[in-house]
Image (cartoon, coloured by chain):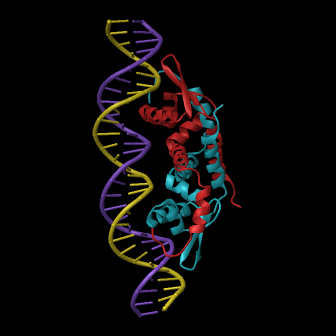
Chain colours: A cyan, B red, C yellow, D purple
Amino acid sequence: MAHKHDHSQAIEEVSSLMPSDELLCDLGDLFKLFGDTTRIKILYSLFESELCVCAIAELLKMEQSAISHQLKILKDAKLVACRRSGRTNIYFLADEHVRTIIGQGYEHLTEDRG
Amino acid sequence: MAHKHDHSQAIEEVSSLMPSDELLCDLGDLFKLFGDTTRIKILYSLFESELCVCAIAELLKMEQSAISHQLKILKDAKLVACRRSGRTNIYFLADEHVRTIIGQGYEHLTEDRG
DNA sequence: CTTTCATATGAATCTCTATTCATATGATAC
DNA sequence: GTATCATATGAATAGAGATTCATATGAAAG
């Protein structure tokens, strides 16, 4: 903490531009949702059409329980929502930011460097 | 895995639109980098000016070692880079997508719902 | 060359979290 | 009602990862 060379000026400048700790924390939590391959796959699978739980499980070749747990996380974060249809729960994207955020990441990965 | 109701058609449609497993995995890894408050703060602090390690540590009120570890992760991912200046290492953003991706998350959090 | 400063790094710890297993809930069919 | 299907959920496990501590490296000053 006690450093010898001074950078208090730079720190002051940057400090004044930094968002609140709460917002920065929320930002981290938001991106954490996208930071898991299973959740990314689930979100991507809902890009074009709504799907029931077992369709997603079959598509991703994963257990139904694992998918349900992740869907709950995404639902709590309001990134997906669902509606009942008979015995099945149909999930769909609930936030258009999902597309743009994943799209930006996609661009970053597929874009030629330059 | 063996479900009784059929959704093979929906699965086929979605399957054909899904990116490769490798890309989806890379996407998850990319967002994982933004899914940590410390790394978000580091990246944000580099938005306006380059900074040395101990300036970041002082700014975030964290130990120098913790910052160094996270900077290594960000550097390995090519999101930041650094240059020597005497005894200090000056870090700076190495990828403009950092701004846009964080910006999208910021918009999502601060935008009025509607 | 020795000392000091700035940073990097390896190991250990601790926390967080994704998955699995077992089971509960909720809805339809019979 | 009972049986079956679809989903949700709690507990346990296991793996990943963030921080700390101690120490190593690397550069400049003396």
> In which quadrant of the rendered image does the N terminus of chain B lie?
bottom left
- How many marks on residues? 0
Q: Quadrant of residue A78?
A: bottom right
Q: Against A27, is C11 above or below?
A: above
> In which quadrant of the rendered image does the C terminus of chain B lie?
bottom right
Q: Against A42, is C10 above or below?
A: above
Residue at (52%, 23%) from the top-left corner?
A6
Image coordinates of residue B97 in percent, x first then y, are 63, 39
B8 with respect to C9 (left or right):
right
Image coordinates of residue A35 in percent, x first then y, are 52, 49
B18 with respect to D15 (left or right):
right
Residue at (49%, 76%) from the top-left corner?
B4
Residue at the limit of the structure toward the right, as seen here: B114
D22 with respect to A88 (left or right):
left
Residue at (60%, 66%) from the top-left corner?
B10
Of A82 and C1, which appears nearest the observer? A82
Of B86 and A99, which appears nearest the observer? A99
Q: Against B26, is B78 above or below?
A: above
Residue at (44%, 66%) from the top-left corner?
A65
Image coordinates of residue D15 in percent, x first then y, are 37, 49
Of B22 and B88, which appears nearest the observer? B22
Image coordinates of residue B15 in percent, x first then y, are 58, 59
B14 with respect to D16 (left or right):
right
* Whether residue A91 can be seen here: no
* Whether residue A52 can be seen here: yes
